[in-house]
Image (cartoon, rainbow, N blue to C red):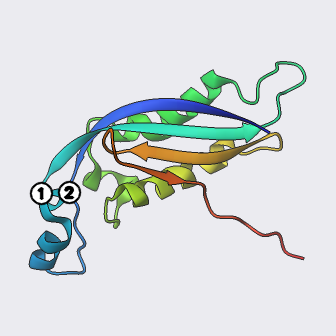
Amino acid sequence: MIYITRVERFSASHQLVNPNISEEKNKEIFDKCHEMHGHNYKLEVTVAGKPDSESGYVMDFKELKDIIKNEIIEKVDHQHLNDVEMFKGLILTAEFMVTIFWEILESKINRDTVKLYSVKLYETENNFVLYKGVKRHSAH
């Protein structure tokens, strides 16, 4: 199995809010992140597969770039993430963001020869979240 990774970047603002708890509890849990703030995010999408016999590619990097840009970056770059449709109803932590990104990308990337392997989102240079999806077991 060979793994290839595409890196994209986007800038966006957000506020960490749980609508099911009080304003005081939100401030206690999320501290400064409860206030409106922004990040320069780095998104790494890794796919796994075997090289195609004709092209030698696991997946064409241009195709992977286009999927990430069209499905994610164009929708989140320079946006207030709390207002973005894909995140409605979520507490906008990086943990929740990577699971949404995974759900969107998996159906666009997966095919017989290549599968989405991981989605990594850097919120800062020092803090990132890595998601490898949910293992699906086939029915016996």
Which mark is drawn over residue 35? 1
Residue 131 vs 23, above or below: the answer is above
Which mark is drawn over residue 47? none
Residue at the image point whose x is 25% and y is 41% from the top: 39
Q: Percent from the top left, x then y, of residue 72? A: 45, 40
- Label 1, residues with CA under 10 Å away: few <14, some 14-19, many ≥20: some
3D distance between C-alphas at marks 2 and 1? 6 Å
How many circles with numbers are drawn on the protein? 2
Q: Amino acid at mark 2?
A: Gln
Residue at the image point whose x is 41% and y is 60% from the top: 96
In this view, the residue farthest toward the top is 55
Q: Amino acid at mark 1?
A: Glu
Residue receiving disc 2: 15
Q: Quadrant of residue 32?
A: bottom left
Q: In terms of secondary structure, where does tag 2 sit?
A: loop
33 vs 114, nearest the viewer: 33
In this view, the residue farthest toward the bottom is 21
**Relative to residue 57, is residue 7 drawn left or right?**
left
Assess whether mark 1 and mark 2 are in contact (beta carbons under 8 angstroms). Answer: yes
Q: Quadrant of residue 88?
A: bottom left
122 vs 68, nearest the viewer: 122
Q: Percent from the top left, x then y, of residue 29? A: 20, 72
Residue 20 vs 107, above or below: the answer is below
Residue at the image point whose x is 33% and y is 38% from the top: 125
In this view, the residue farthest toward the front is 126
**Relative to residue 7, is residue 81 drawn left or right?**
left
Q: Which is more N-terminal, label 1 or label 2?
A: 2
